[in-house]
Amino acid sequence: MKIMLLVLITAFSLFLTACGSDKRVVIDKHAQIPSWYLNPPKSEGSVMYALGEGKSKREAIDNALSLMASTLSVSISSTFDAKTIVKEGRVNSSEATYVNQTLSEVKKIRIVNYEILNAAKLGFKRMAVLVRADKRKVFLGLKDDLDQRFLILQNEQNSLQQEDALKKLFFYEKSLQKLADVPDILAVMKVLNQNFDQKLYLQKLHEYKNSYNTLHSKITFSLIAVPNAVMLKKPIAKGLSVEGFTLADKKDSFHYKIFINANIAKANSYGFSIARAEITLITKDNHDNVVATNLLHITGQSSQGYAIALQDLSKKFDTLVKDKGVKKVLSLNI
């Protein structure tokens, strides 16, 4: 009986000890670490290798490709360092800034053409993969991607010939956003293929930038407000100025009129004067065609009278334009 009691006490003590101990990651003791993981092949010549780990096979592959992109950024850095030596120790700060930015952006470039040589489980929820990529195939993949992007944009541009200036400006703005990574991709392509001539792509990129800047400089606006909404003109004018637009009174195809209307209801509540406004913003082109509309509801309030409540309303509208941007407030697709 005593022996049985002793066994139960011992078992219960072991149970409490197990419950109080920290949780530990269980490693498969029988899993052998593969030789390709311990001694991965080195990238040389026309072939690149990268080892990646992760909680899943997909995560391990992504990490391997990110590492592979990082090795390309090292090559870019080496090329840049070689150029700066010729400058008798002087490094152009703008170039240095550009290269540093390029190195960080290069890591985000997606490598598509690759193959998984090996994959293995290292232990509890841990995977490792060995990825290989042929430099020529990676180069061609990046080139095909750029060619496709420029082709799609060219087709879109051709279909906008009859559209108004703002719609064209919206197209160029979005195009530049889609092409923002082109300089970094070209830098990688140059590392992958020293004979690659990037002038054609840089010229196309310059054409989009030039078209955007030229069109932007021609567009002008004028503001027309009903008496109740005159106080709202200044925030819109400042917002347009921040975006680089000019206020003028013209009648060409690049001029737009913004009509500002406000229906304001006066009220009192718990000692506060309240000004509830329904603000209508309508933008028209030179032919009086509506190109954008927006409806806003803003309430101003004050314990010092209705006039101060109106000032509060104006301040809230001004803050909205600053925070959201005048393009968002006017609902312009630019």
Image (spheres, grey):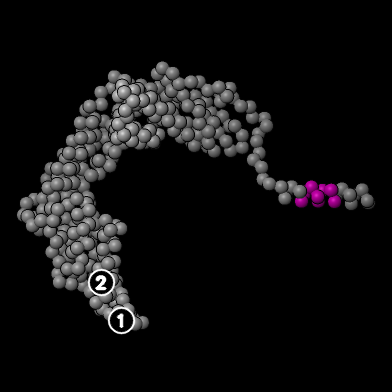
What's the residue at 46%, 24% (across, down)? 49
Relative image position of residue 221 (x, y in whole percent)? 13, 56
Magenta-tinted stretch: 9-16
Relative image position of residue 97 (x, y in whole percent)? 33, 35
Examine the residues drawn in magenta and state their main secondary structure. helix
Relative image position of residue 146 (x, y in whole percent)? 28, 32
Mark drawn on residue 311: 2
What's the residue at 28%, 80% (across, down)? 305
Residue picked out by circle 1: 268
Q: Are marks 1 and 2 in contact (CB under 8 Å)?
A: no
Membership of 10 in magenta stretch: yes
Q: Amino acid at mark 1?
A: Asn
Mark earlier in primary sequence (1, 2): 1
Quadrant assignment, res 222: bottom left
Quadrant assignment, res 91: top left
What's the residue at 14%, 61% (across, down)? 223
Q: Secondary structure at mark 2?
A: helix
Horizontal arrangement in the rendering, residue 291 relative to residue 124 (left or right): left
Q: Is residue 285 visible?
A: no
Depicted 147 relative to depicted 174: above or below: above
Q: Secondary structure at mark 1?
A: strand
Frontmost residue, 41 versus 210? 210
Q: Residues within 10 Å of mark 2 (few under 14, many from 20)?
A: some
What's the residue at 39%, 36% (across, down)? 104
Depicted 334 relative to depicted 112: above or below: below
